[in-house]
Image (cartoon, coloured by chain):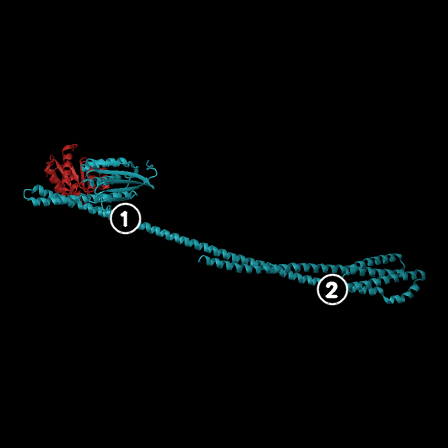
Chain colours: A cyan, B red
Amino acid sequence: MRLFRPLKKLRFFKRGFNILLFFGFLFALTAGAVTVFSIVRTEKSNQLAIGAHEVAVRLENLRFSLQIMSLSYRTYLFTQDPELLVRFEQAAKESRIWMQQLESDFRDSPLESEQMRKLVDLYRERMKLARESRTTLESEGLGALAEKMKDTARQNLPFLMDEIVARLIQEQADSVRQHERRAKRDYRISSTAILACVASCLGFGSWAVFLLNGEVARSAQRTLAAMEAERLVQQMNDQLEKRVRERTVELESANKELEAFAYSVAHDLRAPLRAVSSYAHILTEDYAAKLDAEAMRITGVITGESRRMGVLIDELLNFSRIGRQQINHQIVDMRGMAQSVFEEQLAVHGRSGVGFDLGDLPPAVGDRILLRQVWSNLIDNAIKYTRNRPEVLIRIRGSVSDGFLKYVVEDNGVGFDPRFTHKLFGVFQRLHTLDEFEGTGVGLAIVQRIVSRHGGQVSAEGKPGVGAAFSFTLPQHPDGNPQHA
Amino acid sequence: MPDSREVVVLLVEDSPQDAEITIRTLKKKNLVNSVVHLKDGQEALDWLFQEGPYAGRSGPVVPKVILLDLKLPKVDGLEVLKAIRADDRTRLIPVVIMTSSLEERDLVQSYSLGVNSYIVKPVDFENFSAAVAEAGHYWLLVNQNPLI
């Protein structure tokens, strides 16, 4: 949920952002369209202004040609210089050409076309009068012509034509000015639109960039926050590990201290015990004559018990030493070791006629001296607790499974009550009285300690009057423990 | 004070009981007629080198064997052993460590310093006196010392 909410927020934010961006884009597009439209319009107005200007120029040319025409003709009438007649004809031709052009220029504007038609009519009338006046001049002379011209001169055709042309010129000039004004206005509009377009593009663009930057910054912040959290977790883990290490070291040192304490207590008990034992002995040696039978019995108990206490202390020291002793890993021939320990223990107990069935035992990797101690204690027990049996059989078997080597020492001795199995491996724990079987109750505790220091486990099975089986496992070493055939 | 011709055992032992049993055993077995018992390491060194309270004692008596405890007041057994082995007057004297310590470290250090024998005192009287008797018999009768 906590992860989902910011995502949702982000989506909402993105939608709002997209809408705004869309409007920005629309605005920029509109501004762009206005720009293009007004640029086109400016262009058109400019074209129109140029067109009107060209028309005005043509009208000026026409006006000039008409004036040349009028001037050269009148001068001819007075001078009768044929050169002037040629000039007149030429100007008339030019005027005709200009008028034709202008007629096509004004094709789409009815008012101007009307004016042009009037102008062309006047031109025709003017040409007709010119032809008539020449004929009059050539046939009747200048006086008749002057008489004739009194009527026509009143009409003053050149003046009327000039008036029309001048008006048309004026109109064209107005048109040019008007188009130029429009072009200017459209130019202003297009400039503004361009500015708006650019401004909006820049504005929205930078806004988008800014927002994106913010988003990037936020996501960077989130990443940083995640990294920070990870770092904190790591730090806490490190601290925890450190604390565990410290506690382990403390525990180990406390354990070592305890062991050292137990060791030194046991050790320091030896000297006074030796004194007790020794002085009791001295008493029996030096004062035997003065002591009666009961006193001798009592001193005997003192020496006997102090000897037993001495054994207990030595076993305790032995047990404690095993906990602290360095383990030297070697390949150990377990079968050979079990065989030699059995013979040794048989001699120690002064026994014979003990059935011994030794199977194939896989070799192990471990401390030779400590593993010998294991065999010694287990076989010692087996021989001890089969003491009262008529037919004794001690069986030793070995196997390999699940990366562990397993060794079992089985006897058909007195066995034990399975309810007390958990007590068997405790220090000074005994399931038999001293009257039945001697012992200190440290042997199996030592076995367990050695086996657990090797990374293995011990277990026991027993039935009273039937027998007992003690087994221990050791981790199989990949190099040192070839699969048992 | 014994003269130089006597067979002398130097016993350096802080426990009076252990000392008494050791002396009693040695005498009972007729192994020695003179035991010098000193109670700490400093006293042992003073006696050996005739210094301090033993300056100018009658002698020079060189013991036939030194029975040395490790845990001693003032100067401990290993330091005494070191001093004995460092001095030409004493370096050839056989030294037998008699201690309650079965610590591997003590054993290694003792042998490194040139001890001749290392005996762990058994707890009960019979074994203890047997060990003392055996050691005494060996070092005083069986073993031959160079003439110092």
Above or below, A119 relative to A261? below
Q: Do labels 2 and 1 share a chain?
A: yes
Kind of element beneath mark 1: helix
Q: Which quarter of the rendering shows the N terminus of chain A? A: bottom left
State the mark number for residue A29.
Answer: none
Q: Which chain hosts label 2?
A: A
Picture coordinates of residue A172 (x, y %)?
75, 63
Quadrant of the image occupied by residue A410: top left
Q: Which residue has dot 1 on it?
A: A253
Q: For numbered disc 2, what is the local secondary structure?
A: helix
Q: In which quarter of the image is residue A403?
A: top left
- Kindly report the distance in space between the C-alpha atoms of the residues bearing marks 2 and 1: 114 Å
Residue B132 image position (x, y, % from top left): 15, 38
Residue identified by numbered label 2: A174
Q: Nearer the viewer, residue B87 or A309?
A: A309
Number of residues whose C-alpha sits closer than 10 Å to that of mark 1, classed few (under 14), some (14–19) or many (20 or more): few
Point out residue A103 in the picture as x, y percentages from the top left corner. Answer: 79, 60
Q: Mark 1 lies on which chain?
A: A
Under mark 1, the amino acid is: Ser
Does any portion of residue A294 appear in the rendered image? yes
- Give the amino acid type for the residue marked by disc 2 in the picture: Asp
